[in-house]
Amino acid sequence: MHPHRPLPADSELAQAIAVLARAQQDAVWSRQQVANQVRSLLREYYPAALHAFQGKEGGLTRADARVILTLAPTPAKAARLTLAQIRAALKRSGRTRSFDTEAERLRTVFRGEYAHHLPAVENAFGQQLLALLKQVDAACQAADDLATATEAAFHQHADSEILLSFPGLGPQLAARDLAEIGDDRTRFADARALKSYAGSAPITRASGKERFVGRRFVKNNRHMRGGFLRAFSALQASPGANAHYRRRREHGDWHNAAQRHLLNRFLGQLHHCLKARQLFDEECAFAPLLFSPAPTVGVRVRA
């Protein structure tokens, strides 16, 4: 018997998708790492920039944030920006509406009262910020280019339609699923093997009368990270998934445990759909939850 586990016999296209999907995931992580460095630097000398872009989708990696910070890398330069300059910067970033409102908001934030460093020190921080912004621009471009390539390759695969039929899965998350699972249907003997590989299935340890059931620490970390995003997105896209999650929370599971339980169920359904070549069916997947009466725990009815 050969001492090593045989490699899965994935198709050439599946292997190419795996390379692209993992590279895109790495690019996203790199982009966030550089963005965290920018945020840490802005806390040192430029709090107005943090206030200007906090709470917005994308944060400091947004195109408008990068263009504005490149135009005004120091608080002194930002305070001198005119409405016309801010509007022009917003247009260069690709923004298509609400120029006047956003420009007025940014000018108000930049001209607020903040503590300042000495001018020479502030300018030095500005040079450091410009260097980091070049890294952010490169990381954002790399993530976007790899996302486009990943999506194009994924749509060529025969399993793409089945994966995209699942709630919470878009082209990127579905491509990551395919990258980690592959298209060799003999790789996982049953759904339990797939769940254990992904790390969603709990692990049981027993000794005598003692029995412990807990989460897996040895698992496919890439698959699990995408799985949590998938389970969270499915709460809004799927009534059955939301009902399953709520039931687990009512039974005492914390948020992560309930999401992991939901992901475990999704992986079992995915294994069946890929084997049977069927699309995801909401009513079939969550029939007991969709057609069961709403729980009345804690509800008092007046006589």
Image (tube, helix red, strand yellow):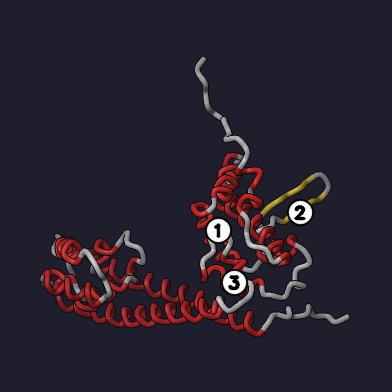
Judge by depth and name the residue closer to the eye, 220 or 294: 294
Q: Position of residue 226 (x, y in %)?
A: 55, 65
Q: Is residue 86 visible?
A: yes
CA separation in Å, label 2 and label 1: 33 Å
In the drawing, what numbered circle is on residue 160? 3
In the drawing, what numbered circle is on residue 167? 1
User: Above or below — where is 297 with respect to 24?
Assistant: above
> What residue does disc 2 label?
205
Q: At 65% from the left edge and 52% from the top edge, which residue is drawn?
A: 285
Q: Residue flagged by tag 3: what amino acid is it? A: Ser
SS assignment at label 3: helix
Q: At 54% from the left edge and 52% from the top edge, which residue is drawn?
A: 238
Q: Quadrant of residue 209?
A: top right
Mark earlier in primary sequence (2, 1): 1
CA separation in Å, label 1 and label 3: 13 Å
User: Above or below — where is 232 with respect to 62?
Assistant: above
For residue 188, side relative to residue 3 (left or right): left
SS assignment at label 2: strand
CA separation in Å, label 2 and label 3: 37 Å
Q: Residue furthest bottom?
A: 12
Q: At 16% from the left edge and 64% from the top edge, which residue is drawn?
A: 100
